[in-house]
Image: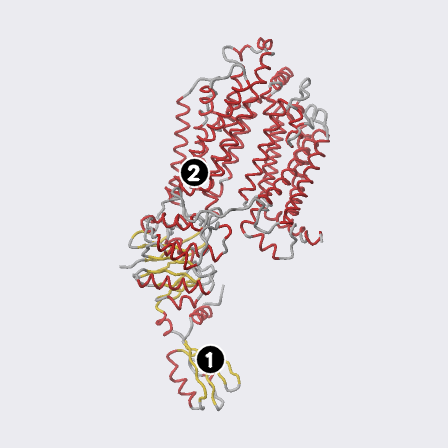
């Protein structure tokens, strides 16, 4: 059984196509990364998943139910942290957390206190006086103090300091250990790398890549830094070598995974002094997609 | 030093003008058309000299004085005197509301949304914001003065000379400038834009009430109210210019005070401080209804108190009316069709209650339109992302609106009756006033229906409900005197309400209005269930 599935989800605002045939599938116990640049359609997708926006075409199901028609029933088991958190300036953080938890129906008072403590939140202050990070904490505490089966998090750690960010990651891992699913949208690639099992990349309303990080890395390049005693000839013209930068006898470049062995063999003829290789970061993945599809928009 | 404080005010002025390039002209055009179209209609509506003099006699009635201000030039009640006396005050109210909304939007509104922070991080002076919006509104009000004055003069009616027409326009503009300054002051005191608008409107209402009581009972009391000053200009009859100077002088003082307070405080802070709140939510704050009530409870309480005072103000006029009507015994022979078996006093009750009911509709509409306010501030998704249905959200606000309609109407009626009973020798029965007031509820529900319909299909056009209420206000407020054609009053729900106790109770009409309200509301619900929510 899948927790969340979209089939050819399309959303149009007038003539503008915000989402174009999006296909997603989140399995139980999975942390699913949804990454893309600003304005790619991440938040729009999430709002469709939550039944706030109505899909123009396509099928959207959460827990096997229709995301638009059965929104209320679905939401009893969903916890959501929006990307931009707008709270009522006249209510206190504590009141908002309670209200949110009650509106979902489930209640876990001890968990609430524990999380308030953990995130170091001042619950008697009015939301109007909270900083962005504190508003984020209110949303995170109310999300994680409820017993949800699916957590939808829209750029959740923007605005948190490193310490709080670590707390947040702990909460996410705990949720996964308890068998919950997490749908995490982000443009911070390191965050997704640390947490996610599988990833979809969205750009201009279209999914351009889906798979596990392992699979994606397989398709891509490794970063290599090499230093040799003798100058290396013709490295730049070798098959599979990209972005070569030379600094004396130091070479840094990227190499297609399937060509890696051949290139290392070739380098070793020139007396290697130093060889460092790093797996591709999501950043590289991302940038490569940009280059191939005509750069950032 | 001072120059630094106001740095880049000029550019800021252009920014405001750019943002409001539709909004401000729209206000000006509506006010201009309102004045000129009605002005032009007077000769058709009241063509004969006798009718005009008869109207002058009714204007001596204290109830009329409370509504329109003291009559002047009644011995020769030409078109100029009539138009200025009957229209100036209500137009001044519209101009004041325009200035209040615009200033609140560009001061606290921008501060609340964080836009001001970005601007203040640029080389923009601390006082440039208040300075710029003040400059823009000086310009807008001056323009308004000229076009309205010019428009009235161009009508070429008897008694409407150039000086009087200009004075009419300038009185509008000067009062506008005054209320812009008052709002700028409240923007420093309150911490939110809602609070700023609330305090400013409360001040406007208070000014109106003080004037109403003062005009009937004591001239000196009236002079406390800025709305009392404007009527003393006696436009088209004596054309006194001192009230304009007085208003502008007061505006400068208030604006200076606002600037001074602005220079003292931190961005985002107010002078009325906020206290720490509850650690956990109360038993009432459990869902959408509790939330809606919690967010609006202060507003509901304030409006209820305000409506009690409004009712009491009109009620306090009844004593003077009684006296006045006694002296009128002789006149009753002249007006045989009016008297019959209904007392003259009873004639004015439905008129007062119609006006009261329309003012009471303002808080009721605010309750419903809050939905759109919440949506544009992206707070609706907080609810919709949880196990809360759209029907439940809209239903909560609807319930609150119905509750508010009952509450404010009850308070207004109670105020009217108790003040009336206190000052008259033969008090009108509570039941009579209660019936005559509560009968307006179906009309208010139709207004709620219109608002719900817009929420369901075109929330961006929520402002239309205010336009509709404004139209109703104009038709009912002035329609009785001007004897406007019937179709005009049939376009507003308030025009269909039986005028108890003068007319008979008419249940079919009330049922029809309630049914209309129901249909509008249900259709609105259907739309709300199907549309995209912004956030």
Is B421 in front, or is B239?
A: B421
Q: What element carries label 2?
A: helix
Task: Name the residue located 57 percent from the left edge and 15 percent from the top edge.
Answer: B322
Q: Position of residue B102 (x, y in %)?
A: 59, 42
Task: Name the residue located 42 percent from the left edge and 20 percent from the top edge.
Answer: B506
Q: Note whether B182 is above or below A183 in the view shown.
A: above
Mark 2 Cα-neighbour bin, 10 Å: few <14, some 14–19, many ≥20: many
In the displayed structure image, the side of residue B503 where residue B271 appears, left or right: right
Q: Note whether A264 is above or below B44 in the view shown.
A: below
Q: Note whether A22 is above or below A100 in the view shown.
A: below
Q: Position of residue B73 (x, y in %)?
A: 68, 21
Label 1 sits on residue: A253
Measure the alpha-carbon separation of dots 2 and 1: 63 Å
Label 2 sits on residue: B453
Q: What element carries label 1?
A: strand
In the displayed structure image, the side of residue A251 where residue B117 appears, left or right: right
The quarter of the picture where residue B313 lies is: top right
**Pointer 1 indicates a residue of which chain?**
A
Q: Position of residue B91 (x, y in %)?
A: 61, 32
In the displayed structure image, the side of residue B59 where residue B388 appears, left or right: left
Q: Where is residue A42 in the image (x, y as percent from the top left)?
A: 42, 58
Is B316 in front, or is B168?
A: B316
Mark 1 Cα-neighbour bin, 10 Å: few <14, some 14–19, many ≥20: some
**Pointer 2 indicates a residue of which chain?**
B
The quarter of the picture where residue A6 lies is: bottom left
The quarter of the picture where residue B82 lies is: top right
């Amino acid at each position: 059984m899948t927790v969340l599935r979209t089939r050819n989800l399309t959303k149009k605002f007038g003539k503008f196509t915000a989402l174009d045939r999006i296909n997603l599938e989140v399995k139980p116990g999975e942390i699913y990364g949804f990454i893309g640049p600003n304005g790619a359609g991440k938040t729009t997708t999430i709002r469709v998943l939550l039944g706030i926006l109505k899909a123009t075409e396509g099928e959207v199901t959460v827990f096997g139910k229709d995301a638009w028609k059965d929104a209320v029933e679905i939401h009893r088991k969903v916890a959501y942290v929006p990307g931009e958190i707008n709270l009522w300036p006249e209510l206190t953080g504590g009141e908002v957390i309670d209200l949110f938890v009650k509106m979902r129906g489930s209640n876990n008072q001890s968990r609430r206190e524990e999380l308030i403590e953990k995130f170091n939140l001042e619950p008697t202050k009015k939301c109007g006086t909270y900083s962005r990070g504190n508003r984020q904490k209110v949303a995170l505490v109310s999300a994680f103090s409820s017993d949800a089966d699916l957590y939808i998090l829209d750029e959740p750690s923007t605005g948190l300091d490193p310490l709080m960010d670590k707390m947040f990651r702990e909460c996410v891992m705990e949720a996964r250990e308890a068998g919950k699913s997490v749908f995490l949208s982000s443009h911070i690639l390191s965050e997704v790398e640390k947490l996610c099992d599988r990833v979809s990349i969205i750009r201009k309303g279209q999914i351009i890549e889906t798979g596990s990080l392992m699979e994606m890395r397989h398709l891509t390049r490794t970063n290599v830094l090499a230093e040799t005693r003798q100058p290396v000839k013709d490295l730049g013209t070798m098959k599979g070598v990209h972005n070569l930068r030379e600094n004396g006898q130091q070479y840094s470049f990227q190499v297609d995974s399937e060509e890696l062995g051949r290139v290392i063999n070739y380098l070793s003829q020139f007396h290697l002094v130093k060889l460092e290789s790093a797996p591709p970061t999501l950043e590289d993945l991302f940038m490569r997609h940009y280059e191939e599809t005509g750069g950032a928009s | 030093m001072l120059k630094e404080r106001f740095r880049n005010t000029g550019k800021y002025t252009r920014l405001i003008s750019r943002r409001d390039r539709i909004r401000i002209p729209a206000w000006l055009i509506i006010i201009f058309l309102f004045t000129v179209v009605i002005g032009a209609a007077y000769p058709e509506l009241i063509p004969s000299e006798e009718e005009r003099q008869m109207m002058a006699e009714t204007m001596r009635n204290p109830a009329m004085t409370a509504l329109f201000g003291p009559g002047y030039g009644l011995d020769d009640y030409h078109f100029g005197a009539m138009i200025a006396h009957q229209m100036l005050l209500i137009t001044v109210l519209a101009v004041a509301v325009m200035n209040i909304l615009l200033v609140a939007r560009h001061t606290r509104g921008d501060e609340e949304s964080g836009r001001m922070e970005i601007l203040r991080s640029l080389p923009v002076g601390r006082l440039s914001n208040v300075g710029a919006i003040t400059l823009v509104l000086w310009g807008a009000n001056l323009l308004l003065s000229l076009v309205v004055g010019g428009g009235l003069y161009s009508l070429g009616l008897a008694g409407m000379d150039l000086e009087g027409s200009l004075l009419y326009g300038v009185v509008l503009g000067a009062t506008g400038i005054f209320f812009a300054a008052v709002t700028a002051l409240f923007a420093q005191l309150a911490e939110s834009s809602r609070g700023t608008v609330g305090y400013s409107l409360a001040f406007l209402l208070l000014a109106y009430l003080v004037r109403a009581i003062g005009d009937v009972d004591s001239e000196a009391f009236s002079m406390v109210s800025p709305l009392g000053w404007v009527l003393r200009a006696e436009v088209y009859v004596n054309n006194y210019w001192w009230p304009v100077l007085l208003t502008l002088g007061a505006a400068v003082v208030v604006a200076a005070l606002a600037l001074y307070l602005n220079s003292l405080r931190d961005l985002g802070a107010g002078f009325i401080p906020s206290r720490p709140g509850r650690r956990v939510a109360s038993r009432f704050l459990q869902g959408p209804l509790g939330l809606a009530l919690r967010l609006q409870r202060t507003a509901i309480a304030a409006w209820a108190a305000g409506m009690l005072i409004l009712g009491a103000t009109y009620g306090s006029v009844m004593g003077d009316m009684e006296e006045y009507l006694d002296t009128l015994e002789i006149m009753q022979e002249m007006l045989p069709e009016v008297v019959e078996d209904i007392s003259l006093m009873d004639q004015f009750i439905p008129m007062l209650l119609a006006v009261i009911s329309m003012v009471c509709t303002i808080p009721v509409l605010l309750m419903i339109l809050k939905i759109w306010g919440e949506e544009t501030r992206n707070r609706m998704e907080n609810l919709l992302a949880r196990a809360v249905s759209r029907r439940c959200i809209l239903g909560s606000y609807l319930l609150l609106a119905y509750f508010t309609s009952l509450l404010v109407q009850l308070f207004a009626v109670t105020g009217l009756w108790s003040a009336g009973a206190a000052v008259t020798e033969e008090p009108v029965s509570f039941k009579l006033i209660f019936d005559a007031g509560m009968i307006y509820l179906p009309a208010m529900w139709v207004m709620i229906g219109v608002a719900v319909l817009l929420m369901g299909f075109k929330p961006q056009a929520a402002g239309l409900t205010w336009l509709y209420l404004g139209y109703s206000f104009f038709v009912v407020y002035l329609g009785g005197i001007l004897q406007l054609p019937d179709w005009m009053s049939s376009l507003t729900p308030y025009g269909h309400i039986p005028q108890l106790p003068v007319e008979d109770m008419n249940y079919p009409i009330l049922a029809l209005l309630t049914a209309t309200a129901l249909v509008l509301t249900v259709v609105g619900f259907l739309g709300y269930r199907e549309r995209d929510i912004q956030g």
